[in-house]
Amino acid sequence: MHAFDVLGDPVRRRILELLADGEMTSGSVCEVIGEEFGISQPAVSQHLKVLRENGFATVRPQGARRLYAVNAEPLQDIDAWLDRFRRFWTPHLDALATELARGRRARRLGGADETPRSTP
Amino acid sequence: MHAFDVLGDPVRRRILELLADGEMTSGSVCEVIGEEFGISQPAVSQHLKVLRENGFATVRPQGARRLYAVNAEPLQDIDAWLDRFRRFWTPHLDALATELARGRRARRLGGADETPRSTP
DNA sequence: CCAACATATCAGCTGTCACTTATATAAGCG
DNA sequence: CGCTTATATAAGTGACAGCTGATATGTTGG
């Protein structure tokens, strides 16, 4: 599943927003999301699974609870993908801004955006 | 359709990448995308429609052709949404970087991310 | 140990999205 | 004017994402 697909779901975006403020147990997430979106505990748990399996969140058991936290790497990938469009709203990067942008880009791991081969 | 849903499709992402290099006719886009993804002209046309209707692309008729171009506003929205996670990979913004980040954020239009009301 | 809690998984249903083929609209050209 | 080119729309279909209710797994406290 591609990073953008993961973020395509409003529930998952909201969960990440929650986690952005710090670790949360699955239960707390379920409480808030259930309240806001009116969906069941299994539904939330499934969303957490998607976030986990796609590297957007990490889990840490603490007794019976599971503490979820943001893992930003995939978000950084998205940020990197946006780079090619930044010039549309940042007409002329001055030297330092260029430097900063380059820094962000360089800090990325390996490129390889899955664009399919010409003739399968 | 939410911005992230629009970008959830690899074909649409690729189209935007193509348009990032400058205007293209629908035909040219069809040619490249058809080649790369092996889908039909109507399929590509439908994707272009989604991009159009969600503000990711603009069209300009030129005779029988239609020239498509990137419209970056929705991408900027996404960039703004990412702001709350930037601290995860930019541990300590120095003064100027903060200033730049604030500039980007401030340049955004109105906030209002569609988070549903508590009890419908 | 066992009852109650916390969380994950399973199986099945349903709506939506991306595709196809066929066709409509419209501009250029001889 | 027809004919071809360029693009969009329509209608139908298959796959799959996200939901629910039921249930499995694992933990804690009495």
Image (cartoon, coloured by chain):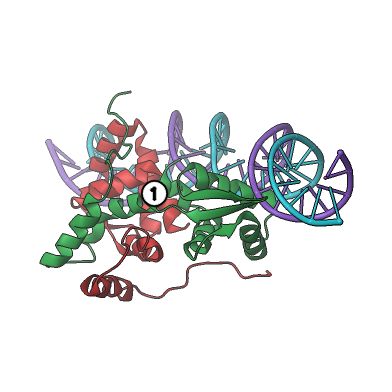
Chain colours: A green, B red, C purple, D cyan
Q: Position of residue A79 (x, y in %)?
A: 32, 55
In the foreground, B97 or D5: B97
Q: Position of residue A70 (x, y in %)?
A: 47, 55
- Specify whether A119 is left or right of A47: left
- Specify whether D25 is left or right of B69: right
Please determine whether, in this image, residue A119 is positioned above or below residue B98. Answer: above
Q: Position of residue C3 (x, y in %)?
A: 88, 49
Total numbered labels? 1
Residue A51 in view of the camera: yes
**Residue that lies at the very extreme toward the top in this rendered image:** A120
Identify the residue at image location x=40%, y=59%.
Answer: B54
Identify the residue at image location x=25%, y=75%.
Answer: B99
Q: Label 1 is found on which chain of the structure?
A: A
Asked which quadrant contains residue A95, the reply is bottom left
Asked which quadrant contains residue B69, the reply is bottom left
Identify the residue at image location x=21%, y=73%.
Answer: B96
Secondary structure beneath label 1: helix
In the foreground, A120 or A1: A1
Residue B64 in view of the camera: no
Please determine whether, in this image, residue D22 is positioned above or below residue A58. Answer: above
Q: What amino acid type is highlighted by mark number 1?
A: Pro
Point out the image quarter for the C terminus of chain A: top left
Q: Position of residue A110 (x, y in %)?
A: 27, 40
Disc 1: which residue: A74
Other-residue count near label 1 (Cα within 10 Å), few / some / many at <14 / 14–19 / ≥20: some
- Specify whether C16 is left or right of B99: right
